[in-house]
Each structure stands twice: as C-alpha cells, then as structure tokens.
Image (cartoon, rainbow, N blue to C red):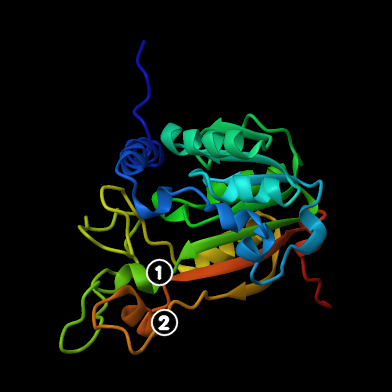
Amino acid sequence: MNHPEPSGQDQAAEHNRRAWDRLVRNKQRFTRPAKDDEFHDPLKVLDGNRWLGNAVLGAQLLCLAAGGGRQAPLYAAAGAKVTVVDISAEQLSLDRQVAAEKDLDICTVQTSMDDLSMFADQAFDIVIHPVSTCYLPKIAPVYREVARITRPHGLYISQHKQPTSLQASTLPSENGYELLTPYYCEAQPLPAVQGSLHREEGTLEYLHRWDQLIGEMCRAGFVIEDLTEPCHANSQAAIGTFAHRSTFVAPYVRIKARRMASPAANRVWLPE
C-alpha cells in the first residue's frame, strides 16, 4: 500500500518535536518550570493585562502548545481545570513533574497544535496559547481547531512573534536592524540561527503576515477585543542585546479574542 507523503505542516511539526525535546534536555530558557514564588499569586504573573480575572476559577482551560512546567501549573494553581497540549513529550514531562510537586491536577496531551481531534466541540471556556504559531507553516488550521473546541463567548488569548521581528537582523549594521527576510516568503522556513534570543536554535520557524495572524483568526470565528505589544525595550541596553533591539523592533504581540456565538455574528449587513 502506498502511503501519502507527509505535508510540509507535518514535517515541520515532527522536526520541531525533536528540536523541543532536545531544548528541554539542554535546559533552554523556555523550558524552565515556574519558580516557587510565582505560585503565591499566579494570576499576577500570568495576567498582567487583567484580561482574565476571576474567569479562570473553575473554568475548563486549555494551555495550547504550552508545555514546560510553567503555564499549566500556574493556571491550575489559580483555580482552573487545566489541560495542556504540547508536541514535545519532554516539555509535558516538566508539567507532570511540577504538578506532582505542587499537588495540582493537570491533564497532559501530546499532539500538534493544529490537531485537537481528541477534544469534543466546545470543550473549553478559555484557550491560552503562548508563542508557538511560528513553528508551523500555516496557522489557519490551528485557528480553526481552536474555534471548534472553544465555547461560544469563550476567550482565546494568544501571543505571537511579530513578523517584523522575524524579518529583522539580530545584530545591527551601520544602518540599524535591517530587514533581511522577505515579508511574502510563501511559508518557507526562516534561515537557521545560532545563539539568538529572538529565535529558538534548531527549530523550524515561519513568518506569518498580519493578515494571517489577525485575519485568519477573525475568519475562524473570533472577534478581537484587545491587543498589546509586551514591552522589552531598554534604550540604554548594550547595542545588539535583546532589550536594545526591542527598542526598535517589538518582538511579540499578545491578542485577546472572543469566540463568536455563531459564524453569522461576524457578518456586517449593509443596506442595499
């Protein structure tokens, strides 16, 4: 029997599964569990914009592509009923480790963020999605799955790497941080990096345009309620550091979106 060749989406997911397992073993910065003092007031740590408040109490909450022993344990400590999804078994092992240490009840599921077929429609009140959409060539399938499993009027809070940050050089030239990567790059992986604080070494990353980051989310059935750009800037920092570059190029965008009651709610009716 002939088997279909894996898609670019599947190949990227498998590559990044191995890469993140390796990053955990190397104790990379985004694979470090939450600190003990962060459990004293977890929502202060997680919800600086105060988008959630008491909504997490008793809520069915999905931490999507969010393994690593930080997001899921802290949300569980804040009172949510937490499920965490990640493609990396090593990342999920950190969640189980912290949950055991803190006596927290967390469900872990290993899968790619664009395949949530194990969950029923409208299974979650809140979906929390830290930076990870950059690891797949296409984000529309991710948004469609999130829309399917989110209850009407439920919250979807996500963070993404800004396209300009993925275009710009890591180190400045005499002209500053120049744009080196095309904006329209047809779902091709970005050039490999070494020693970057803006990218994860060894992973495949993809630039997504604003019409994909925002437009695809709206077309999937969400309404944008708020948007922030977390500030990491410090104009006094040494040239070439993460903080100095962030003074000129915002690294991230954080989006608060709400699931519409029905697709029809997104239509704007104009007089004929």
**Which residue position holds label 2?**
233
**Quadrant including the N terminus:** top left
Q: Which mark is residue 163?
A: 1
Determine the CA span between mark 2 and mark 1: 17 Å
Quarter of the image where one finds residue 47: bottom right
- Could you say which is closer to the camera, residue 77 or residue 176? 77
Q: Is residue 68 above or below residue 256?
A: above
- Could you say which is closer to the camera, residue 146 or residue 243? 243
Furthest residue toward left: 174
The three-letter amino acid code for the residue at tag 2 is: Ala
Residue positioned 40% across, 36% down in the render? 10
Q: Is residue 160 above or below residue 233?
A: above
Label 1 crowding class (10 Å Cα cut-off): few <14, some 14-19, many 20+? many
The three-letter amino acid code for the residue at tag 1 is: Pro
- Could you say which is closer to the camera, residue 58 or residue 173? 58
Quarter of the image where one finds residue 60: top right
Q: Is residue 93 above or below residue 20?
A: above
Residue 23, horizontal then vertical, whole percent? 32, 44
* Direction from residue 188 to residue 63 in the image, left or right: right
* Direction from residue 251 to residue 130 in the image, left or right: right
Q: Which mark is residue 204?
A: none
